[in-house]
Image (cartoon, grey):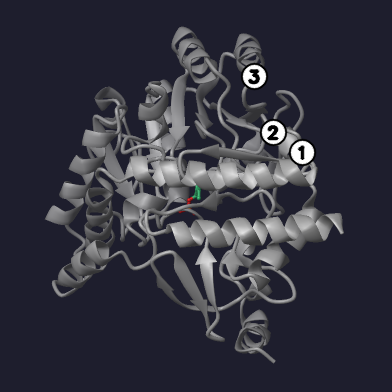
């Protein structure tokens, strides 16, 4: 019996499903990890993997990035939380406002979930309207207003989880990503919309890039109708470029939510936007947002060190991801297996069974059974993928040519096995 399965039989009796977040579960048991170093993660049985999950996004410079670890050691020696403002949080905020075109001002939070929750409240408080629009398959964390199942067309939300009252999502609407027309016609029919919250590149139904002109169209429509455009850049912020997707595509939203990378591997979140909007946040204004650990000096020091570390490294990271993806695509094509590999910057996804995916509904067409087989095969070959077909593979600046080679040949041998 492996140490992981032993720990799992213990943990599943003590915590639901044996995991602290559902996506980490897989059968017969999740692997318990004991160490991360660069591009590698190590399980409690001593097995080493090339990590392509990278904690679902934060680790853009790999595990235990020395610059980050040094900054954290210095910070932690000075205490861990003050309940008062501190210089590390100011430095991180400055760095975010400098990088993100939409952010004149920023408020820190403890997670991406908190960031989107506060941003939605702020959008409602600022506009005096109630409705929010999200994309089918768009993920914005684990709070009631955004837990709406992918509905069809622009249907009003139905709760996507037990325990979410219908009233909590009565004002949440969903439309299809990459369809600006559907969004505009929803606004034609409804005057009570405060904001649309969207991932500029979808990252929770695999990687789905915006069609040419789509983000610009969303910007034009939201301006015309007086609806706030919120980019949820919890994944894409500081990943697709130093200024996120908004800098890469040249489309500036009214507000932005962030998380993952900005904590340098520690819990963090942030929301920011135009000054006139942000000045409505308490205590400057009347929209409440708060947190004991918000702006925590350790997370702030780690996030700051990671942003600095990444300066000048995006081109290489994106290039090595493009090389990997092109090798994977070649093997996929040679094998004649149906599927698509979609990629933006250093994030990619393998959609087996689908020719291409342009929105959340099409993403539901991926072959989950084949993906599970791929996941198992890659694990056996020492490659750790996220266990769900709709999650994203993340590269880091710590991944090497050797890692790329190992991933590619493991994928090639999987395709051979499928054909056999
Ligand atoms: C991960 C994620 C969140 C939630 O962030 P947490 O820190 O897990 O609460 C929100 N939005 C997007 C786009 C995400 O990928």
Residue visible at 30% across and 36% down? 281
Above-or-below relation of 217 to 13:
above
**Is the CB of the residue bearing disc 2 within 8 angstroms of ligand 1?**
no
Residue at 38 percent across and 21 percent down: it is: 250
Categorize mark 3 by other alpha carbons within 10 Å: few (<14), some (14-19), many (20+): some
Identify the residue position indicated by label 3 in the image. Answer: 179
**325 on left or right of 41:** right
The residue where tag 1 is placed is 354
Can you give x and y, in whole percent of width and height, for residue 256 in the image?
Answer: 39, 34
- Please tell me whether mark 1 sits on a helix, a strand or a loop: loop
The circle on residue 188 is none
* Residue 266 spot, x, y in % from top left: 35, 62
Of the two numbered discs 3 and 2 in the rendering, the one whose residue sits closer to the viewer = 2
Residue 4 versus residue 241 in the image, above or below: below
The foreground one among 340 and 330 is 330
- Are the two marked residues, 1 and 2, in contact with CB atoms closer than 8 angstroms? yes
Residue that label 2 marks: 357
Q: In terms of sequence position, does the residue under pointer 3 or pointer 2 come before the other?
A: 3
Q: Position of residue 159 (x, y in %)?
A: 70, 43
Which of the pair 395/329 is nearer the observer? 329
Q: Badge 1: few (under 14), some or many (20 or more) residues near its Cα, within 10 Å?
A: some
SS class, disc 2: loop
Occupied quadrant, residue 83: bottom left
Q: How far apart in space, not on screen, are marks 3 and 2 (Cα)?
A: 13 Å
The residues bearing labels 1 and 2 have C-alpha atoms spaced at a distance of: 7 Å
């Amino acid at each position: 019996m492996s140490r992981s399965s032993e720990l799992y039989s213990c943990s599943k009796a003590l915590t639901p499903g044996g995991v602290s977040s559902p996506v980490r579960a897989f059968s017969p048991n999740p692997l318990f990890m004991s160490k991360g170093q660069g591009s590698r993660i190590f399980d409690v049985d001593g097995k080493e993997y090339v990590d392509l999950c990278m904690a679902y996004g934060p680790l853009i410079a790999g595990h235990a990035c020395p610059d980050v670890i040094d900054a954290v050691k210095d910070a932690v020696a000075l205490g861990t939380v003050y309940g008062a403002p501190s210089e590390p949080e100011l430095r991180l905020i400055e760095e975010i406002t400098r990088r993100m075109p939409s952010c004149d001002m920023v408020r820190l939070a403890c997670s991406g979930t908190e960031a989107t929750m506060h941003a939605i409240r702020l959008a409602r408080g600022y506009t005096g309207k109630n409705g929010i629009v999200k994309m089918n398959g768009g993920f914005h964390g684990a709070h009631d207003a955004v837990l709406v199942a992918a509905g069809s067309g622009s249907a009003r939300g139905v709760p996507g989880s037990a325990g979410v009252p219908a009233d909590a999502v009565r004002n949440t609407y969903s439309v299809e990503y990459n369809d600006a027309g559907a969004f505009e016609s929803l606004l034609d029919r409804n005057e009570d919309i405060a904001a649309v919250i969207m991932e500029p590149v979808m990252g929770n139904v695999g990687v789905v890039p915006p069609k040419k002109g789509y983000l610009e169209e969303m910007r034009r429509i939201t301006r015309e109708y007086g609806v706030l455009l919120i980019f949820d850049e919890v994944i894409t912020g500081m990943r697709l470029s130093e200024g996120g997707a908004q800098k890469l595509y040249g489309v500036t939203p009214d507000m932005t939510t962030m998380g993952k990378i900005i904590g340098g591997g520690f819990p963090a979140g942030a929301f920011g936007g135009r000054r006139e909007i942000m000045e409505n946040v308490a205590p400057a204004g009347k929209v409440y947002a708060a947190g004991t650990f918000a702006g925590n000096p350790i997370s702030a020091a780690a996030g700051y060190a990671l942003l600095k570390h990444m300066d000048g490294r995006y081109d290489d990271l994106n290039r090595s991801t493009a090389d990997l993806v092109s090798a994977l695509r070649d093997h996929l094509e040679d094998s004649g297996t149906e599927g698509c590999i979609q990629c933006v910057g250093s994030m990619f996804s393998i959609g087996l069974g689908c020719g291409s995916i342009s929105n959340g509904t099409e993403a539901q067409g991926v072959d989950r059974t084949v993906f599970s087989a791929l996941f198992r095969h890659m694990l056996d070959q020492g490659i750790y993928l996220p266990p769900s077909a709709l999650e994203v593979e993340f590269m880091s600046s710590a991944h090497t040519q050797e890692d790329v080679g190992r991933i590619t040949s493991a994928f090639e041998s999987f395709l051979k096995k499928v054909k056999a």
